[in-house]
Amino acid sequence: MIAQQEIDNRAANPTVPAEMPTGAEMLIQALAHEGVDTIFGYPGGAVLHIYDELWRARDRITHYLVRHEQGAVHMAEGYARATGRVGVVLVTSGPGATNAVTGIANAYMDSTPIVVITGQVPKHLIGTDAFQEVDTVGITRPCVKHNYLVREARDLPAIVREAFHLARSGRPGPVVIDIPKDVSAARANYSRLDHVSFPFATRPARVDEDLAREAVRQIVNAKRPVLYVGGGIVNSGAVDSLLSFAELLQLPVTPTLMGLGGFPSSHPLCLGMLGMHGTYAANMAVAESDLLVALGVRFDDRVTGKLATFAPHARVIHVDIDPANIGKNVTPTLALTGDVGQVLNKFLSTVPPQRNEGLASWWDQIRKWQLSQPLRFSGSQNQIKPQSVIRELHRLTEGEALITTDVGQHQMWVAQFYPFTRPRQLITSGGLGTMGFGLPAAIGARLALPDQLVVAVVGDGGFQMTNQELATAVQYDLPVKVLIMNNGYLGMVRQWQEMFYDRTYSEVDISVAPDFVKLAEAYGVAGFRVERPAELHEVMEAALRHKGVGVIDVVVAKEENVFPMVPAGADAREMITHA
Ligand SMILES: Cc1ncc(C[n+]2csc(CCOP(=O)(O)OP(=O)(O)O)c2C)c(N)n1
Protein backbone atom coordinates (compact mmCIF):
# COMPACT_ATOMS: atom_id res chain seq x y z
CA MET A 1 0.00 0.00 0.00
CA ILE A 2 1.28 3.45 -0.82
CA ALA A 3 1.55 5.71 2.24
CA GLN A 4 -0.65 8.81 2.25
CA GLN A 5 2.47 10.96 2.31
CA GLU A 6 3.74 9.39 -0.90
CA ILE A 7 0.35 9.95 -2.57
CA ASP A 8 0.47 13.61 -1.60
CA ASN A 9 4.08 13.80 -2.76
CA ARG A 10 3.25 12.49 -6.15
CA ALA A 11 0.17 14.66 -6.46
CA ALA A 12 2.25 17.67 -5.51
CA ASN A 13 5.00 17.06 -7.99
CA PRO A 14 5.11 13.85 -9.97
CA THR A 15 8.33 14.73 -11.77
CA VAL A 16 10.56 15.32 -8.74
CA PRO A 17 12.79 12.39 -7.77
CA ALA A 18 11.89 10.59 -4.54
CA GLU A 19 15.29 11.19 -2.91
CA MET A 20 14.68 14.92 -2.55
CA PRO A 21 13.42 16.01 0.85
CA THR A 22 9.77 16.80 1.47
CA GLY A 23 8.54 20.16 2.67
CA ALA A 24 8.07 18.64 6.12
CA GLU A 25 11.68 17.42 6.18
CA MET A 26 12.90 20.81 5.04
CA LEU A 27 10.85 22.52 7.71
CA ILE A 28 12.34 20.36 10.46
CA GLN A 29 15.85 20.84 9.07
CA ALA A 30 15.34 24.58 8.91
CA LEU A 31 14.03 24.67 12.48
CA ALA A 32 16.99 22.66 13.69
CA HIS A 33 19.23 25.05 11.81
CA GLU A 34 17.69 27.90 13.84
CA GLY A 35 18.66 26.04 16.99
CA VAL A 36 15.09 25.02 17.84
CA ASP A 37 14.96 22.14 20.31
CA THR A 38 11.51 22.76 21.79
CA ILE A 39 8.10 22.94 20.11
CA PHE A 40 4.72 23.30 21.79
CA GLY A 41 1.91 21.91 19.71
CA TYR A 42 -1.16 19.89 18.94
CA PRO A 43 -1.57 17.69 15.85
CA GLY A 44 -4.30 17.42 13.21
CA GLY A 45 -4.89 16.39 9.63
CA ALA A 46 -3.17 19.29 7.90
CA VAL A 47 0.08 18.85 9.82
CA LEU A 48 0.36 15.07 9.71
CA HIS A 49 3.35 15.08 7.38
CA ILE A 50 5.12 17.50 9.71
CA TYR A 51 4.30 15.42 12.80
CA ASP A 52 5.52 12.31 11.02
CA GLU A 53 8.83 14.03 10.35
CA LEU A 54 8.98 15.48 13.84
CA TRP A 55 8.76 11.98 15.25
CA ARG A 56 11.88 11.00 13.32
CA ALA A 57 13.65 14.13 14.62
CA ARG A 58 12.62 13.54 18.25
CA ASP A 59 16.19 13.12 19.45
CA ARG A 60 16.91 16.70 18.31
CA ILE A 61 13.59 18.47 18.84
CA THR A 62 11.27 17.77 21.76
CA HIS A 63 7.62 18.33 21.09
CA TYR A 64 5.40 19.17 24.07
CA LEU A 65 1.86 18.01 23.52
CA VAL A 66 -0.50 20.54 25.07
CA ARG A 67 -4.22 20.16 25.77
CA HIS A 68 -5.43 23.26 23.90
CA GLU A 69 -3.68 25.32 21.23
CA GLN A 70 -4.04 28.55 23.23
CA GLY A 71 -1.98 26.80 25.89
CA ALA A 72 0.72 26.00 23.33
CA VAL A 73 1.13 29.64 22.36
CA HIS A 74 1.17 30.87 25.96
CA MET A 75 3.77 28.20 26.79
CA ALA A 76 5.90 29.42 23.89
CA GLU A 77 5.45 32.96 25.20
CA GLY A 78 6.47 31.91 28.72
CA TYR A 79 9.49 30.13 27.28
CA ALA A 80 10.42 33.16 25.16
CA ARG A 81 9.93 35.71 27.91
CA ALA A 82 11.87 33.72 30.46
CA THR A 83 14.88 33.46 28.15
CA GLY A 84 14.68 35.94 25.27
CA ARG A 85 14.74 33.00 22.83
CA VAL A 86 12.13 32.51 20.12
CA GLY A 87 9.27 30.23 21.21
CA VAL A 88 7.90 27.81 18.60
CA VAL A 89 4.37 26.48 18.13
CA LEU A 90 2.91 23.92 15.72
CA VAL A 91 -0.85 23.57 15.26
CA THR A 92 -3.22 22.28 12.64
CA SER A 93 -5.46 24.22 10.26
CA GLY A 94 -8.93 25.60 10.99
CA PRO A 95 -9.76 25.29 14.69
CA GLY A 96 -6.13 24.61 15.58
CA ALA A 97 -5.17 27.96 14.07
CA THR A 98 -8.14 29.86 15.49
CA ASN A 99 -7.50 28.46 18.98
CA ALA A 100 -3.98 29.82 18.67
CA VAL A 101 -5.10 33.35 17.73
CA THR A 102 -5.55 34.59 21.32
CA GLY A 103 -1.97 33.64 22.10
CA ILE A 104 -0.69 35.20 18.89
CA ALA A 105 -2.49 38.47 19.66
CA ASN A 106 -1.14 38.32 23.20
CA ALA A 107 2.43 37.92 21.93
CA TYR A 108 1.91 40.79 19.51
CA MET A 109 0.73 43.18 22.21
CA ASP A 110 3.54 42.21 24.58
CA SER A 111 6.32 42.14 21.95
CA THR A 112 7.15 38.47 22.50
CA PRO A 113 9.18 36.63 19.87
CA ILE A 114 7.39 33.48 18.71
CA VAL A 115 7.04 31.58 15.45
CA VAL A 116 3.71 29.81 14.98
CA ILE A 117 3.51 27.15 12.28
CA THR A 118 -0.04 26.36 11.19
CA GLY A 119 -1.20 23.64 8.83
CA GLN A 120 -3.44 24.64 5.93
CA VAL A 121 -5.65 22.63 3.58
CA PRO A 122 -3.96 21.60 0.31
CA LYS A 123 -3.48 24.50 -2.10
CA HIS A 124 -6.08 23.31 -4.61
CA LEU A 125 -8.75 23.33 -1.85
CA ILE A 126 -8.00 26.82 -0.57
CA GLY A 127 -11.06 29.00 -1.07
CA THR A 128 -13.50 26.08 -1.33
CA ASP A 129 -14.62 26.02 2.32
CA ALA A 130 -12.75 22.78 2.63
CA PHE A 131 -12.87 20.79 5.85
CA GLN A 132 -10.93 22.69 8.52
CA GLU A 133 -10.12 25.52 6.18
CA VAL A 134 -9.75 28.97 7.63
CA ASP A 135 -7.97 32.00 6.22
CA THR A 136 -5.19 31.96 8.80
CA VAL A 137 -3.14 34.60 7.06
CA GLY A 138 -6.19 36.88 6.92
CA ILE A 139 -7.27 36.22 10.49
CA THR A 140 -3.83 36.76 12.00
CA ARG A 141 -2.74 39.67 9.79
CA PRO A 142 -3.56 42.42 12.30
CA CYS A 143 -1.78 40.68 15.16
CA VAL A 144 1.49 39.43 13.70
CA LYS A 145 4.72 41.11 12.72
CA HIS A 146 4.46 39.15 9.51
CA ASN A 147 2.81 36.03 8.15
CA TYR A 148 3.39 33.70 5.23
CA LEU A 149 1.28 31.32 3.18
CA VAL A 150 3.90 28.93 1.82
CA ARG A 151 3.20 28.04 -1.80
CA GLU A 152 6.30 26.05 -2.73
CA ALA A 153 8.19 23.59 -0.56
CA ARG A 154 11.47 24.95 -1.86
CA ASP A 155 10.69 28.33 -0.25
CA LEU A 156 10.50 26.85 3.24
CA PRO A 157 14.15 27.20 4.32
CA ALA A 158 14.27 30.89 3.41
CA ILE A 159 10.87 31.58 4.96
CA VAL A 160 11.83 29.90 8.23
CA ARG A 161 15.08 31.84 8.29
CA GLU A 162 13.35 35.11 7.72
CA ALA A 163 10.53 34.33 10.15
CA PHE A 164 12.97 33.79 13.02
CA HIS A 165 14.88 36.90 12.11
CA LEU A 166 11.69 38.95 12.08
CA ALA A 167 10.37 37.48 15.33
CA ARG A 168 13.47 38.38 17.31
CA SER A 169 14.72 41.56 15.62
CA GLY A 170 13.66 45.13 16.31
CA ARG A 171 10.56 45.13 18.45
CA PRO A 172 10.06 41.37 18.87
CA GLY A 173 6.74 39.74 18.04
CA PRO A 174 4.89 36.78 16.55
CA VAL A 175 5.34 35.46 13.01
CA VAL A 176 2.98 32.90 11.47
CA ILE A 177 3.97 30.38 8.78
CA ASP A 178 0.91 28.75 7.20
CA ILE A 179 1.81 25.56 5.33
CA PRO A 180 -0.69 23.81 3.04
CA LYS A 181 -0.67 20.04 3.44
CA ASP A 182 0.51 19.40 -0.11
CA VAL A 183 3.45 21.77 0.42
CA SER A 184 4.62 19.81 3.47
CA ALA A 185 4.36 16.66 1.34
CA ALA A 186 6.00 17.98 -1.83
CA ARG A 187 9.62 17.16 -2.60
CA ALA A 188 12.09 19.84 -3.59
CA ASN A 189 15.75 20.72 -3.42
CA TYR A 190 16.89 21.66 0.06
CA SER A 191 19.48 24.33 0.32
CA ARG A 192 20.71 25.41 3.70
CA LEU A 193 20.54 29.11 3.56
CA ASP A 194 23.26 30.81 5.45
CA HIS A 195 23.14 34.03 3.52
CA VAL A 196 19.53 34.95 3.00
CA SER A 197 19.16 38.63 2.41
CA PHE A 198 16.10 39.96 4.16
CA PRO A 199 14.06 42.61 2.45
CA PHE A 200 12.94 43.71 5.91
CA ALA A 201 16.35 43.52 7.52
CA THR A 202 16.81 46.46 9.78
CA ARG A 203 20.32 47.24 10.80
CA PRO A 204 20.21 48.72 14.29
CA ALA A 205 20.34 52.41 13.49
CA ARG A 206 23.29 54.30 14.97
CA VAL A 207 22.17 56.51 17.82
CA ASP A 208 21.95 60.09 16.65
CA GLU A 209 24.73 61.87 18.55
CA ASP A 210 23.19 65.33 18.44
CA LEU A 211 19.80 64.16 19.59
CA ALA A 212 21.37 62.12 22.38
CA ARG A 213 23.39 65.13 23.54
CA GLU A 214 20.31 67.32 23.46
CA ALA A 215 18.31 64.71 25.40
CA VAL A 216 20.98 64.53 28.08
CA ARG A 217 21.15 68.33 28.25
CA GLN A 218 17.41 68.45 28.89
CA ILE A 219 17.59 65.67 31.48
CA VAL A 220 20.47 67.29 33.35
CA ASN A 221 18.68 70.64 33.42
CA ALA A 222 15.24 69.35 34.33
CA LYS A 223 13.89 70.28 37.73
CA ARG A 224 11.31 67.51 38.01
CA PRO A 225 12.40 64.66 35.74
CA VAL A 226 10.95 61.14 35.77
CA LEU A 227 12.11 58.03 33.92
CA TYR A 228 9.06 56.08 32.71
CA VAL A 229 10.37 52.63 31.72
CA GLY A 230 8.66 49.70 30.03
CA GLY A 231 9.07 46.25 28.57
CA GLY A 232 11.58 47.59 26.04
CA ILE A 233 14.14 47.81 28.84
CA VAL A 234 13.72 44.09 29.46
CA ASN A 235 13.69 43.09 25.79
CA SER A 236 16.76 45.15 25.01
CA GLY A 237 18.75 43.85 27.99
CA ALA A 238 19.22 47.46 29.08
CA VAL A 239 18.76 46.88 32.79
CA ASP A 240 22.34 47.65 33.85
CA SER A 241 22.56 50.74 31.66
CA LEU A 242 19.29 52.02 33.10
CA LEU A 243 20.49 51.45 36.65
CA SER A 244 23.77 53.26 35.97
CA PHE A 245 22.06 56.19 34.29
CA ALA A 246 19.41 56.60 36.99
CA GLU A 247 21.99 56.37 39.76
CA LEU A 248 24.40 58.75 38.06
CA LEU A 249 21.79 61.51 37.87
CA GLN A 250 19.67 60.37 40.84
CA LEU A 251 16.58 60.18 38.67
CA PRO A 252 13.25 58.81 39.91
CA VAL A 253 12.16 55.72 37.98
CA THR A 254 8.67 54.34 37.48
CA PRO A 255 8.17 51.08 35.59
CA THR A 256 5.05 49.99 33.73
CA LEU A 257 3.53 46.57 34.38
CA MET A 258 5.68 45.19 31.54
CA GLY A 259 8.71 47.03 32.86
CA LEU A 260 8.55 45.53 36.37
CA GLY A 261 11.90 43.94 37.13
CA GLY A 262 13.59 46.17 34.55
CA PHE A 263 14.57 48.34 37.50
CA PRO A 264 14.85 46.85 41.00
CA SER A 265 11.60 47.60 42.86
CA SER A 266 13.35 47.92 46.20
CA HIS A 267 15.82 50.52 44.91
CA PRO A 268 15.41 53.93 46.60
CA LEU A 269 15.07 55.60 43.19
CA CYS A 270 12.12 53.36 42.30
CA LEU A 271 8.68 54.90 42.79
CA GLY A 272 6.82 51.69 42.00
CA MET A 273 4.52 51.03 39.07
CA LEU A 274 2.59 53.84 37.44
CA GLY A 275 -0.79 53.84 35.79
CA MET A 276 -4.29 52.74 36.73
CA HIS A 277 -3.21 50.71 39.77
CA GLY A 278 0.20 52.25 40.18
CA THR A 279 1.47 54.00 43.27
CA TYR A 280 0.29 57.43 44.28
CA ALA A 281 3.86 58.75 44.24
CA ALA A 282 4.58 57.45 40.72
CA ASN A 283 1.39 58.91 39.29
CA MET A 284 1.83 62.24 41.06
CA ALA A 285 5.45 62.48 39.99
CA VAL A 286 4.48 61.98 36.36
CA ALA A 287 1.59 64.44 36.72
CA GLU A 288 3.91 67.11 38.13
CA SER A 289 7.08 66.36 36.18
CA ASP A 290 8.66 68.86 33.84
CA LEU A 291 10.47 66.18 31.83
CA LEU A 292 9.21 62.68 31.18
CA VAL A 293 11.83 60.36 29.76
CA ALA A 294 9.91 57.44 28.23
CA LEU A 295 12.16 54.44 27.62
CA GLY A 296 10.84 51.39 25.75
CA VAL A 297 7.19 52.19 26.40
CA ARG A 298 4.14 52.81 24.24
CA PHE A 299 2.00 55.19 26.34
CA ASP A 300 -0.69 52.57 26.90
CA ASP A 301 -4.04 53.96 28.05
CA ARG A 302 -3.75 52.00 31.31
CA VAL A 303 -0.73 54.21 32.01
CA THR A 304 -1.80 57.55 30.64
CA GLY A 305 -5.46 57.68 31.65
CA LYS A 306 -6.87 60.84 30.07
CA LEU A 307 -4.35 61.73 27.38
CA ALA A 308 -5.24 65.41 27.38
CA THR A 309 -4.10 65.81 30.97
CA PHE A 310 -1.30 63.24 31.03
CA ALA A 311 1.95 64.75 32.31
CA PRO A 312 0.61 68.20 31.43
CA HIS A 313 3.71 70.18 32.41
CA ALA A 314 6.27 67.84 30.88
CA ARG A 315 8.41 67.87 27.84
CA VAL A 316 8.56 64.29 26.62
CA ILE A 317 11.63 62.43 25.42
CA HIS A 318 10.60 59.13 23.85
CA VAL A 319 13.07 56.34 23.08
CA ASP A 320 11.68 53.26 21.34
CA ILE A 321 12.89 50.70 18.83
CA ASP A 322 9.58 50.73 16.98
CA PRO A 323 9.07 53.93 14.98
CA ALA A 324 5.33 53.17 14.94
CA ASN A 325 5.24 53.78 18.69
CA ILE A 326 6.71 57.25 18.46
CA GLY A 327 3.95 59.84 18.45
CA LYS A 328 1.21 57.15 18.36
CA ASN A 329 -0.45 58.34 21.56
CA VAL A 330 1.71 61.16 22.86
CA THR A 331 3.75 63.47 20.67
CA PRO A 332 7.25 63.72 22.09
CA THR A 333 9.28 66.89 22.11
CA LEU A 334 12.34 64.80 21.32
CA ALA A 335 12.31 61.29 19.85
CA LEU A 336 15.07 58.75 19.47
CA THR A 337 14.23 55.65 17.47
CA GLY A 338 16.53 52.82 18.39
CA ASP A 339 17.52 50.16 20.85
CA VAL A 340 16.96 51.62 24.29
CA GLY A 341 20.11 49.97 25.70
CA GLN A 342 22.28 51.55 23.02
CA VAL A 343 20.62 54.91 23.57
CA LEU A 344 21.18 54.71 27.33
CA ASN A 345 24.83 53.84 26.79
CA LYS A 346 25.13 56.86 24.55
CA PHE A 347 23.48 58.98 27.24
CA LEU A 348 25.94 57.62 29.80
CA SER A 349 28.91 58.59 27.67
CA THR A 350 27.46 62.05 27.07
CA VAL A 351 26.65 63.20 30.61
CA PRO A 352 28.73 66.33 31.28
CA PRO A 353 30.79 66.59 34.48
CA GLN A 354 28.89 69.73 35.54
CA ARG A 355 25.28 69.12 36.46
CA ASN A 356 22.47 71.33 37.68
CA GLU A 357 22.11 72.08 41.38
CA GLY A 358 20.49 68.72 42.02
CA LEU A 359 17.04 67.41 42.56
CA ALA A 360 16.77 67.79 46.32
CA SER A 361 13.47 69.65 46.35
CA TRP A 362 11.96 67.29 43.76
CA TRP A 363 12.94 64.31 45.87
CA ASP A 364 11.51 66.02 48.99
CA GLN A 365 8.21 66.32 47.23
CA ILE A 366 8.32 62.70 46.02
CA ARG A 367 9.13 61.40 49.51
CA LYS A 368 6.15 63.35 50.86
CA TRP A 369 3.86 61.68 48.33
CA GLN A 370 5.33 58.31 49.21
CA LEU A 371 4.79 58.86 52.93
CA SER A 372 1.32 60.28 52.57
CA GLN A 373 -0.06 57.47 50.41
CA PRO A 374 1.97 54.28 50.58
CA LEU A 375 0.54 51.04 49.17
CA ARG A 376 -1.52 49.63 51.99
CA PHE A 377 -4.44 47.44 52.89
CA SER A 378 -6.33 46.67 56.04
CA GLY A 379 -5.71 43.32 57.69
CA SER A 380 -8.32 40.90 58.99
CA GLN A 381 -8.42 38.17 61.63
CA ASN A 382 -11.00 35.99 59.94
CA GLN A 383 -10.62 36.61 56.20
CA ILE A 384 -7.51 36.11 54.13
CA LYS A 385 -6.65 39.39 52.49
CA PRO A 386 -5.37 38.78 48.96
CA GLN A 387 -2.59 41.34 49.36
CA SER A 388 -1.30 39.40 52.38
CA VAL A 389 -1.14 36.25 50.23
CA ILE A 390 1.25 37.96 47.83
CA ARG A 391 3.31 39.33 50.74
CA GLU A 392 3.51 35.81 52.16
CA LEU A 393 4.49 34.44 48.77
CA HIS A 394 7.25 37.02 48.60
CA ARG A 395 8.49 36.12 52.06
CA LEU A 396 8.41 32.37 51.50
CA THR A 397 10.18 32.57 48.14
CA GLU A 398 12.64 35.19 49.43
CA GLY A 399 11.68 37.35 46.49
CA GLU A 400 13.32 34.90 44.08
CA ALA A 401 10.40 33.13 42.38
CA LEU A 402 9.56 33.66 38.76
CA ILE A 403 5.92 34.69 38.81
CA THR A 404 3.40 34.42 36.01
CA THR A 405 -0.14 35.72 36.33
CA ASP A 406 -3.54 35.68 34.75
CA VAL A 407 -5.47 38.91 34.43
CA GLY A 408 -7.54 40.63 37.05
CA GLN A 409 -7.23 41.82 40.62
CA HIS A 410 -4.66 39.18 41.59
CA GLN A 411 -2.42 40.39 38.76
CA MET A 412 -2.46 43.94 40.13
CA TRP A 413 -1.78 42.73 43.68
CA VAL A 414 1.21 40.79 42.37
CA ALA A 415 2.45 43.94 40.64
CA GLN A 416 1.99 45.95 43.84
CA PHE A 417 3.11 43.57 46.57
CA TYR A 418 5.79 41.33 45.05
CA PRO A 419 8.82 43.58 44.57
CA PHE A 420 10.54 42.26 41.45
CA THR A 421 14.26 42.66 41.39
CA ARG A 422 15.37 41.19 38.08
CA PRO A 423 14.22 41.30 34.48
CA ARG A 424 12.10 38.41 33.19
CA GLN A 425 11.02 37.63 36.75
CA LEU A 426 7.39 38.60 36.08
CA ILE A 427 5.67 37.15 33.05
CA THR A 428 2.20 38.58 32.72
CA SER A 429 -0.27 39.41 30.01
CA GLY A 430 0.02 43.19 29.84
CA GLY A 431 -1.32 44.47 26.55
CA LEU A 432 -4.09 42.02 25.68
CA GLY A 433 -5.03 41.16 29.26
CA THR A 434 -5.61 37.48 28.58
CA MET A 435 -7.27 35.46 31.32
CA GLY A 436 -5.83 31.93 31.29
CA PHE A 437 -2.30 33.08 30.47
CA GLY A 438 -0.73 32.26 33.83
CA LEU A 439 -0.57 28.46 33.99
CA PRO A 440 0.62 27.74 30.44
CA ALA A 441 3.10 30.64 30.59
CA ALA A 442 4.46 29.17 33.82
CA ILE A 443 4.88 25.77 32.17
CA GLY A 444 6.85 27.30 29.30
CA ALA A 445 9.02 29.31 31.68
CA ARG A 446 9.71 26.28 33.89
CA LEU A 447 10.70 24.24 30.88
CA ALA A 448 13.17 26.93 29.86
CA LEU A 449 14.56 27.33 33.39
CA PRO A 450 14.63 23.91 35.04
CA ASP A 451 16.17 25.13 38.32
CA GLN A 452 13.76 27.99 38.79
CA LEU A 453 10.81 28.02 41.19
CA VAL A 454 7.91 29.14 39.00
CA VAL A 455 4.59 30.18 40.52
CA ALA A 456 1.49 30.98 38.48
CA VAL A 457 -0.72 33.36 40.46
CA VAL A 458 -4.18 33.07 38.95
CA GLY A 459 -7.79 34.01 39.59
CA ASP A 460 -10.47 31.38 40.03
CA GLY A 461 -11.95 32.70 36.77
CA GLY A 462 -8.80 32.70 34.65
CA PHE A 463 -7.61 29.35 35.97
CA GLN A 464 -10.77 27.74 34.63
CA MET A 465 -9.88 28.94 31.13
CA THR A 466 -6.69 26.89 30.80
CA ASN A 467 -6.52 24.54 33.79
CA GLN A 468 -6.42 21.54 31.46
CA GLU A 469 -2.73 22.32 30.95
CA LEU A 470 -2.12 20.77 34.37
CA ALA A 471 -2.02 17.54 32.36
CA THR A 472 0.82 18.94 30.24
CA ALA A 473 2.76 19.94 33.36
CA VAL A 474 2.29 16.43 34.77
CA GLN A 475 3.13 14.63 31.54
CA TYR A 476 6.47 16.41 31.18
CA ASP A 477 7.23 16.68 34.88
CA LEU A 478 7.30 20.47 34.96
CA PRO A 479 6.61 21.13 38.64
CA VAL A 480 5.04 24.57 38.54
CA LYS A 481 2.98 25.82 41.44
CA VAL A 482 -0.44 27.35 40.85
CA LEU A 483 -1.68 29.80 43.45
CA ILE A 484 -5.40 30.44 42.98
CA MET A 485 -6.66 33.65 44.56
CA ASN A 486 -10.16 32.31 44.96
CA ASN A 487 -12.71 35.05 45.63
CA GLY A 488 -15.68 33.37 43.97
CA TYR A 489 -16.03 36.32 41.61
CA LEU A 490 -14.67 37.64 38.37
CA GLY A 491 -13.04 39.99 40.80
CA MET A 492 -11.81 42.84 38.65
CA VAL A 493 -15.12 43.12 36.82
CA ARG A 494 -16.98 42.97 40.15
CA GLN A 495 -14.78 45.82 41.42
CA TRP A 496 -15.74 48.01 38.44
CA GLN A 497 -19.39 47.14 38.95
CA GLU A 498 -19.10 48.04 42.63
CA MET A 499 -17.38 51.33 41.93
CA PHE A 500 -18.95 52.52 38.69
CA TYR A 501 -22.19 50.57 38.18
CA ASP A 502 -23.86 51.10 41.53
CA ARG A 503 -22.93 47.68 42.82
CA THR A 504 -24.95 45.86 40.17
CA TYR A 505 -23.11 42.56 40.15
CA SER A 506 -24.17 41.46 36.71
CA GLU A 507 -22.84 37.98 35.78
CA VAL A 508 -19.69 37.94 37.88
CA ASP A 509 -20.57 35.31 40.49
CA ILE A 510 -18.50 32.21 39.73
CA SER A 511 -18.94 30.57 43.11
CA VAL A 512 -20.27 27.49 41.32
CA ALA A 513 -16.85 26.11 40.61
CA PRO A 514 -15.02 22.82 40.87
CA ASP A 515 -13.36 21.84 44.11
CA PHE A 516 -9.88 22.93 43.03
CA VAL A 517 -8.14 20.48 45.35
CA LYS A 518 -10.09 17.58 43.87
CA LEU A 519 -9.53 18.95 40.38
CA ALA A 520 -5.79 18.99 41.04
CA GLU A 521 -5.95 15.45 42.35
CA ALA A 522 -7.87 14.34 39.28
CA TYR A 523 -4.84 15.44 37.26
CA GLY A 524 -2.46 13.61 39.60
CA VAL A 525 -1.38 16.92 41.13
CA ALA A 526 -1.05 17.75 44.83
CA GLY A 527 -3.86 20.04 45.97
CA PHE A 528 -3.75 22.36 49.00
CA ARG A 529 -6.40 24.63 50.44
CA VAL A 530 -6.18 27.58 52.80
CA GLU A 531 -9.29 29.13 54.27
CA ARG A 532 -8.13 30.92 57.42
CA PRO A 533 -5.43 33.54 57.87
CA ALA A 534 -3.77 31.47 60.61
CA GLU A 535 -3.09 28.57 58.18
CA LEU A 536 -1.73 30.67 55.36
CA HIS A 537 1.95 30.51 56.17
CA GLU A 538 2.07 26.82 56.96
CA VAL A 539 0.04 25.54 54.02
CA MET A 540 1.75 27.79 51.49
CA GLU A 541 5.12 26.74 52.77
CA ALA A 542 4.22 23.05 52.45
CA ALA A 543 2.81 23.60 48.96
CA LEU A 544 5.87 25.49 47.74
CA ARG A 545 8.14 22.81 49.22
CA HIS A 546 6.21 20.05 47.45
CA LYS A 547 8.40 18.55 44.74
CA GLY A 548 5.81 18.03 42.00
CA VAL A 549 3.16 20.17 40.39
CA GLY A 550 1.03 21.81 43.08
CA VAL A 551 -2.23 23.73 43.21
CA ILE A 552 -2.91 25.98 46.19
CA ASP A 553 -6.49 27.14 46.52
CA VAL A 554 -6.47 30.21 48.74
CA VAL A 555 -9.95 31.32 49.70
CA VAL A 556 -9.61 35.09 49.97
CA ALA A 557 -11.86 37.97 51.02
CA LYS A 558 -14.57 38.11 48.37
CA GLU A 559 -15.05 41.83 47.93
CA GLU A 560 -11.60 43.31 48.33
CA ASN A 561 -10.71 46.06 45.87
CA VAL A 562 -7.45 47.05 44.22
CA PHE A 563 -6.30 50.52 45.26
CA PRO A 564 -5.09 53.03 44.35
CA MET A 565 -7.13 53.32 41.20
CA VAL A 566 -7.21 55.93 38.47
CA PRO A 567 -10.64 55.39 36.88
CA ALA A 568 -10.41 54.57 33.15
CA GLY A 569 -9.94 57.72 31.12
CA ALA A 570 -9.48 59.94 34.17
CA ASP A 571 -6.72 62.34 35.13
CA ALA A 572 -4.06 60.75 37.38
CA ARG A 573 -4.88 63.34 40.06
CA GLU A 574 -8.40 61.92 40.26
CA MET A 575 -6.86 58.78 41.73
CA ILE A 576 -9.00 56.99 44.30
CA THR A 577 -6.59 55.99 47.02
CA HIS A 578 -8.94 54.03 49.27
CA ALA A 579 -12.46 52.69 49.70
C1 LIG B 1 -10.27 36.02 28.05
C2 LIG B 1 -10.80 37.17 28.84
N1 LIG B 1 -12.12 37.34 28.98
C3 LIG B 1 -12.60 38.37 29.71
C4 LIG B 1 -11.75 39.27 30.29
C5 LIG B 1 -12.30 40.46 31.08
N2 LIG B 1 -11.86 40.36 32.48
C6 LIG B 1 -10.81 41.08 32.95
S1 LIG B 1 -10.47 40.74 34.54
C7 LIG B 1 -11.74 39.67 34.65
C8 LIG B 1 -12.04 38.94 35.93
C9 LIG B 1 -11.03 37.92 36.24
O1 LIG B 1 -11.50 37.14 37.30
P1 LIG B 1 -10.55 36.13 38.03
O2 LIG B 1 -9.80 35.32 37.05
O3 LIG B 1 -11.32 35.36 39.03
O4 LIG B 1 -9.48 37.07 38.73
P2 LIG B 1 -9.68 38.20 39.86
O5 LIG B 1 -9.96 39.50 39.17
O6 LIG B 1 -10.82 37.78 40.73
O7 LIG B 1 -8.37 38.24 40.58
C10 LIG B 1 -12.42 39.58 33.44
C11 LIG B 1 -13.62 38.73 33.20
C12 LIG B 1 -10.37 39.06 30.08
N3 LIG B 1 -9.46 39.89 30.56
N4 LIG B 1 -9.92 37.99 29.38
Image (cartoon, rainbow, N blue to C red):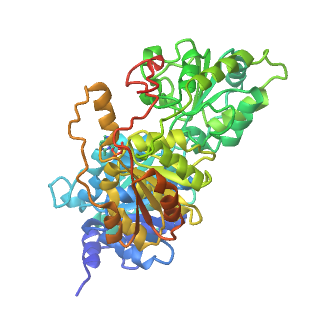
Identified at 71% across, 31% down, the residue is 246
Q: Residue furthest right?
A: 353
Horizontally, residue 175 falls left or right of residue 194, namely left
Q: Position of residue 540 (x, y in %)?
A: 49, 59
Q: Can the viewer see residue 455?
A: yes
Q: Position of residue 35 (x, y in %)?
A: 55, 64
Identified at 38% across, 60% down, the residue is 72
Q: Nearer the viewer, residue 75 or 170?
A: 75
Q: Position of residue 294 (x, y in %)?
A: 58, 27
Identified at 24% across, 61% down, the residue is 121
Which picture quadrant has residue 50? bottom left
219, above or below 106, in the image:
above
Q: Nearer the viewer, residue 186 or 383?
A: 383
Q: Can the viewer see residue 116?
A: no
Which picture quadrant has residue 97? bottom left
Q: Quadrant of ligand 1?
A: top left
